[in-house]
Amino acid sequence: ASRGAGGPDAPFFVLLVGNDSRPGVGGARGDALHLIGINPRLKQASMLDIPRDTCWNGDKINVGNTRGPRAQADAVGGLVGVPISYVVDVDFAGFVGLVDGIGGVDVNVPVKMSDSYTGAYFDAGRMHMTGEQALAFARNRHDFPNSDITRTHNQGLLILDGMRQLRRTQNNALGEFRLLTLLGRHARVDGIGVNDLLRLSRTAFALDPDRIANITIPYTGGGCLGLGAGASELFEIGRAHV
């Protein structure tokens, strides 16, 4: 059964996870963590971007995903103080497959990027990205003074751009079916049955990405990051939206 999902109009939380599993790299740590709180009745949502090095129970929060999507959700839910009903978890190949499966995504690149490590070579401005390009964009942290913090925020921007793409090009019954198929093919899910998948796809099309707050939580320190001033207030704002 789903955790805390409630009735069809009840607020719920979805955790989107991008893990670092790929050939030659094991562990599947949750390196992209984005918690979306959704109020279906009001068609409102907010998204908290959680840096992978945030401290939780004496370790980095992304380690939870090595024990599976539900363990990652329990860590994030414990940090923020909410029950997480659904988890969608993709590795590098799954992410590329999802983006390519919707025909690529139009991304508003916030600043010029030139990162040889990830292959993120982009001018600032709007551009259409393939799955491989979107992955490079999402992984780039070397172009920014605060590294993973900016990367995490940019990942949130990419998620919203992906939702805009879905609403523009897939907002019909066939598009819902295609999204369900893509999730089944490219993602690991937790707490999600067939009816839940249908609910999530319809919710994705109903929400206006321009009205979703994209908030990266503040932090302090280096290595394992502690929550910075204002984090608890941000969590309250996120919970209030649902």
Image (cartoon, rainbow, N blue to C red):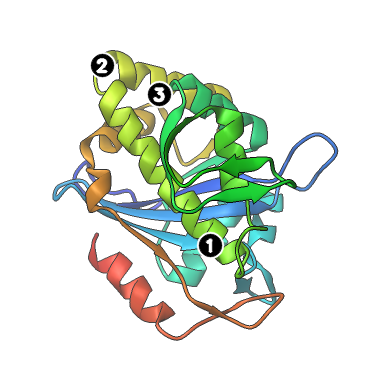
Quadrant occupied by the N terminus? top left
Looking at the rendered image, the disc whose residue lies closer to the viewer, 1 or 2, is: 1
Give the class, few, some or many, for how many residues have Cα within 10 Å of label 3's Cα (few <14, many ≥20): many
SS at mark 1?
A: helix
Q: Position of residue 233 (x, y in %)?
A: 34, 79
Picture quarter containing residue 144?
bottom right
Sequence-wise, the earlier of marks 3 and 2 is 2
SS at mark 2?
A: helix
Disc on res. 150? 1
Q: Which residue is mark 2?
A: 173
- Which of the two residues, 108 or 6, is positioned nearer the viewer here? 108
Q: Which residue is mark 3?
A: 179
Q: Is residue 70 left or right of residue 142?
A: left
Quadrant occupied by the C terminus? bottom left
Sequence-wise, the earlier of marks 1 and 3 is 1
SS at mark 3?
A: helix
Q: Amino acid at mark 3?
A: Leu
Q: Is residue 53 left or right of residue 82?
A: right
Q: Position of residue 168 (x, y in %)?
A: 27, 27
Picture quarter containing residue 95?
top right
**In contact (CB < 8 Å): disc 3 and disc 2:** no
